[in-house]
Amino acid sequence: MLLSAVKARFGKMQGRTDGGKGRFFRKSLIMIFIVSGIPGLIMGALVYWIAGGRVESELLQLHYRQIEQRSQNMDDQLSNLELLLSHWAFDNKFDYSLNGFNFVRNFERTQDITRTLIAMQGSNALVKKAELYIGGSSSVLFNPEYTVLDNQTSSGMYDKLIHGKHITYWTQWAFDTSHPDTKDLTLVHHIPGGSLQPFGVLVFRFDNEKIANLLKTMTPYDDGETFLLQNAGELYVSASGSASNSPFVMALREKIDSLGSPKGSFFLDYKGTTYTVSYGSLSRIADDWTYVSASPITSIIKPVVFISKLIITVSLVALLLAALLSWLASRRIYLPVKRLVTLLGSHANWAGREDEFSLIEKQWQSLHKESLELNTKLAEQLPHVKDSFLHQLLQGYLNDYSEEDLLRRMERFKWDVRNRQFTVLYVQLVGMASMDATFRHGDEGLVTFAAVNMIKELASCHFEQCDTLNFHDLTAGLLLITPENQSLAGAFETFSEELTQSINRILKMRVTIAISRPVSSVSDVPLAFDRTKQAVSYRYFENANQIIDMEKDYLEGDEAAEPQYPFALERELIQALRTGRDDDAHAMLASFLEALSCKGAKEIDVQQGMLHLLGNVQHAIMVSGINPNRLFKGANLYEQLSQIREPQRILKWFQDKVIVPFQKELTGRSDAQVKRMIEQAMIYLQQNYMNDISLDNCADHTGTNPFFLSKTFKQVTGKNFIDYLTELRLEKAKELLRESEMRISDVADQVGYQHSYFNRIFKKLEGMTPTRYRELSRSS
């Protein structure tokens, strides 16, 4: 920033001093420009004079050769069409048997002729129609489909083609009697081929537009004229659609007739435009045709004009380049004077109105003032830049950088990181829900901001280099940079006590502090941060201050003292939800959370237990026929629950987000009488599951018939009667296997099963024997 300001300042000075260049600069500039520019202009003029005429002559010769080649190509195409039509005319499909043939009765041959004509029509892109006409008493036309000509005019029009003077010939013929002026270029062949007494004709009618496009290939430019002319007849085809008696066509024909040569080229001036004309002859059946191609000379020599403009442009660019080089050379020559003027600062001061050293002093003072302002701005922005860097470092976004790169970057931010060790502290505030209305829900950012200010102030008193990060979610991070091999246990203990007391007294909240092990390299800081953040989840789940020092192996604890998952309370909660006992469900949820977060429970255990309960509740919701995604509107309940760290907020969230929506949905699906009946049946099963009970016994107890009980039981609970009874008995059996020393046969008797049947049903549903289940449950 400072360097750019200095450059800008000197740029302003340079703009002021350029106006003060003297006569020596102007003379040297003019002299160098003349020396470097005039030879370039002379060379450009010579190149234009030599190259222009020769290129123009070569282009004209190339144009003539192209016209001749394309006329030969057109002649070959027309010859191929004549050979094609003659080949088909001599085919046995079109012999004497067609004369007087009954095409209606012999429909298969009619179809064969139609397919043949379609193949002939598709054999060349120029052919628009391939037709077969058979004259006689009943005229028949294949076009290419079979048609009977009742109209005398139409049959007479085709009869004229039969009586032509040649067996094969070209003509322009009007096939539409309503438009006699619309004529198609047509190739006619008598049938049978070679007969002196033909009774029909094969006709190729050509697409006028495609013929015109074929002619346009002889004039590769947008302007001009190209046409075909039959020497001994009236056949005339124009690429641009011009009439045979148009002034330009007549002028071309008169000029060609005056030359008396079968082929050649010439120039024609017509209405102020010079045309280059090429003409020649095409040998056709029974006659010769003449092709004529006229193109404006300007279209042909367009490349010459372009080359001329290019030479002129290059010459002008060379002139400008000479001017630029002259200016640069003059500046180099003028360098000593320019340096002096630049130091003086402006043309006015250079003229002698101010002392040169006074000018330098003023300029230096001005630059020094700007430098101080920029340093002040840098000092204000540096904390924000450092915070951004630390966020990226802790989140692992800088893992691709080497250790040396990270050290250099931190040194640019004014950190002393050589021969230092790094320690990360992670601070989490708890007790938001139990505060006495000091803050409300949604004030997490404000509370975190206040806590971060306290952390920053206390850390600066105990540590030489420290930086605090605000995560805005009741958590904060602290990076400490201390000398290597220095013990910080006392400083950590004092800092933690002071921070805990300050937050307890001012914010009325409890705090958990996790302290990482010191690391000697910057690249290990992200891993240390992740482990420290994970360590907080192992705090005891109670509203109390806690300090977790990772040097003391906080993860090792007494496994026997770990709280057990309350399976019975979970089962009773789900049963209360299924039967619609709203008050009991809320009470069971509170009891479940209280049992899960008993003294000694850790945050990660409570969170995992509540996530497990959420999964089982969602399973019960799905079993009852309700789609959880629709019920909870697609919300990610697992993610929301994992972000809550306080018992009261977990309880309220679970009630509002999970229990209440399910109860409302269930209330709308089952009436109160049915739910009471099913509740009575479930209570009966829970009290008598160890006896020999059946659906009939339960129906008698609830005062209904077995069919209605079975149907409503499935509707309310989502399970069949026998499946529910089996699940209830097995759950009681698993509880006895886990918590008692009873024999397997006694356990089977306690839950209403015979010993052998109990082993089979237990293995079928649980995938293992009762004995194996007892061993696994006790080993875990």
Image (spheres, rainbow, N blue to C red):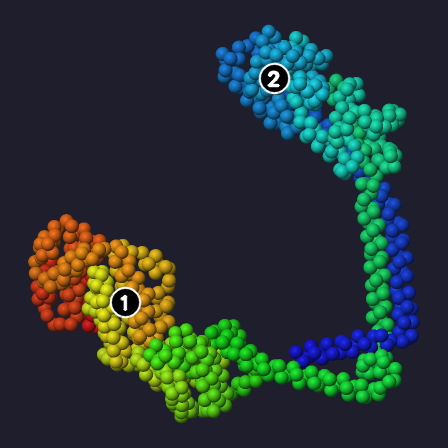
- Residue 225 occupies which quadrant of the picture? top right
Real-space Cα separation, disc 2 to disc 1, in angstroms: 89 Å
**Residue 613: numbered disc:** 1
Q: Is residue 544 left or right of residue 739?
A: right
- Residue 5 occupies which quadrant of the picture? bottom right
Q: Is residue 752 left or right of residue 193?
A: left
Disc 2 crowd, CA 10 A, few/some/many (<14, 14-19, 20+): many
Kind of residue at disc 2: Leu
Q: Is residue 684 left or right of residue 715?
A: left
Residue 698 shows in the view: no
From the top left corner, tell me how far across and down residue 300 is, in percent.
Answer: 81, 41
From the top left corner, tell me how far across and down residue 246 is, in percent.
Answer: 81, 27
The residue pinned by badge 2 equals 132
From the top left corner, tell me how far across and down residue 560 is, in percent.
Answer: 23, 79
Q: State the SS at label 2.
A: strand
- The image shows residue 274, relative to residue 232, as above or below, that is below
Kind of residue at disc 1: Leu
- Give the camera-side residue of 629 and 487: 629
- The image shows residue 263, relative to residue 484, as above or below, that is above
Q: Residue at x 55, y 22 (%)?
A: 115
Foreground tag (2 vs 1): 1
From the top left corner, tell me how far across and down residue 234 is, in percent.
Answer: 77, 19
Image quarter where the N terminus lies is: bottom right
Residue 376 shows in the view: yes
Q: Residue at x 42, y 79 (%)?
A: 447
What count of labels does the image hold?
A: 2
Q: Residue at x 14, y 58 (%)?
A: 681
Q: State the SS at label 1.
A: helix
- Residue 338 occupies which quadrant of the picture? bottom right
- Give the camera-side residue of 304 and 362: 362
Image quarter where the C terminus lies is: bottom left
